[in-house]
Image: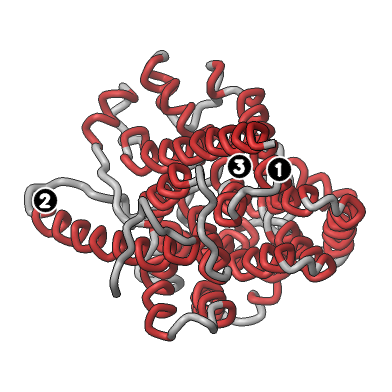
Amino acid sequence: MKLQNPTTSLTSRTLFTQWLLTIQTLGLVVVFAAIMVHGYQGRHWTAVQSFQIAYSWCKQGQEGLGSHCFGDFGLPYNRGLQEFVYSPDNYAAANTPLTAAIFEILRLVPYNYALVLYMLAVLASIAIPFLLYLRTVNLTTRLQLMVLTGAVTSGAIAAIDRGNHVVLIVPLLVGYLLAIKNEQWRRASFFLVLIAMLKFWGIIFVVALIARKQFAKSLAVAVSASTASLAILLTFPQSLGASLSGMLSMAGNRDYANSVAGFAISIQGLLRRIDCLFSDQEWCNSKLSGGALLSSTLISLLVAVLLTLIALILCASKGVPPHISTAAVVSLGFLAVPEAPVYNLVLTTALVVVVVAQKEANIPQGWMASSVALLAAVSVSTLPVTLYSNGLSQWASGSGEGLPVFRSDFWLVPLSWIVFISLAIFDFWRSRSLQDEQQ
């Protein structure tokens, strides 16, 4: 496949097929070589688990794979080892009513059989978008994309490792974004309702609807998702009030949030690590509530609002290339969500599918810098490798426990997306200035 010069004639589709496939292929060769060479020297290149939280959600040796329970599957399947899902302090209550209902259905079959069915659905969610929405792309390229930007990415591997259902959002997000592009508002609303019902933070993608001035549809999505979720809660054994109280209690449980915040891939996760480096050593402990300014809830909210406003501006403005505005929306799922773990990066698969599905269109003048930065950000986010320094982590924590502060991907991923967003804002401002001068 002949590559074009990225500084002269680069299209949206070329960006995510020729160059992305080439970078991913070369990157994986380097990854495998590095693991082989440095593995013999005792260097740790990745953590086996995407993050280490209570991992006893199954009967080890009888359920799961060996000693591996696929915790985010075992937790709701076993109702957090409690009688009711939506009980105060029950980790299982961190799941939405729709997700909990799906696992209640899976409970009708034994753990391992349910796990196989679940994993088949997860793998299908990765494959279906490439096979369904990229029919104009030749089969070989589709399969390459499916493997290199889908199945073997860090987000997909982490999601499978944890058994997290965030992967189920990928085909829904692709359908949602393409429906908006084609102005199929009812179809877009349907997909967004499902996304919001699978993950509490899924409603953040409504920014794409709002940007297209579909205010009534946006409100209808919020009302429909909330009403349907409450209706599902009515089917659970406890009263609606008790179930709702348990769900809200877990959703607002900062101790639980802080237990995974140290493993977040978001911009807020990056700020927590900066706090760790420049504050007292205790701030390195991911299980402690962040009391410093950069780790505060207020900063988390400000970051989420700022990123949402940027995505709104880029989506609503004419002249912004589709791949730039699409990336701004999709990135909210792992940059703006404060406790977003590594597996949220599987959303980059949806970004790749949506961009490649678009027709050939030359990138407008002045948008090359942000386009190349986007290519770099996607590559950094999808290559399944991280350099993990347990010694530095123990030194920083002062506790002798290895913490995720010094995993390279936790630094490089948000930083690469910050570069992209900054250049997108700069290119947007520059293009507006050029338009004003021409007028």
Query: Which residue is tagged 3?
Result: 337
Helix or strand or loop: what does disc 1 sit on?
Answer: helix
Q: Position of residue 14 (x, y in %)?
A: 42, 65
Decide: few, some or many residues near mark 1? Use Cα within 10 Å; few <14, some 14-19, many ≥20. many
Q: Where is the C terminus found, in terms of image quarters?
A: top right
Compared to residue 257, the image places residue 99 above or below, namely below
Quarter of the view holding residue 171: bottom right
Amino acid marked by disc 1: Leu
Q: Position of residue 59 (x, y in %)?
A: 46, 66
Give the mark toward the camera: 1 or 3: 1
Residue lying at 7% horizontally and 48% vertically, measured from the top left: 41
Compared to residue 144, the image places residue 407 above or below, namely above
Query: Which residue is tagged 1?
Result: 312
Amino acid marked by disc 3: Val
Residue lying at 80% horizontally and 49% vertically, measured from the top left: 210
Give the Cα separation between the discs numbered 2 and 1. Answer: 44 Å
Q: Residue 38 got which mark?
A: 2
Compared to residue 280, the image places residue 130 above or below, namely below
Helix or strand or loop: what does disc 2 sit on?
Answer: helix
Residue lying at 56% horizontally and 48% vertically, measured from the top left: 331
Mark nearer the N terminus (2 vs 3): 2
Q: Where is the N terminus found, in terms of image quarters?
A: bottom left
Compared to residue 297, the image places residue 239 above or below, namely below
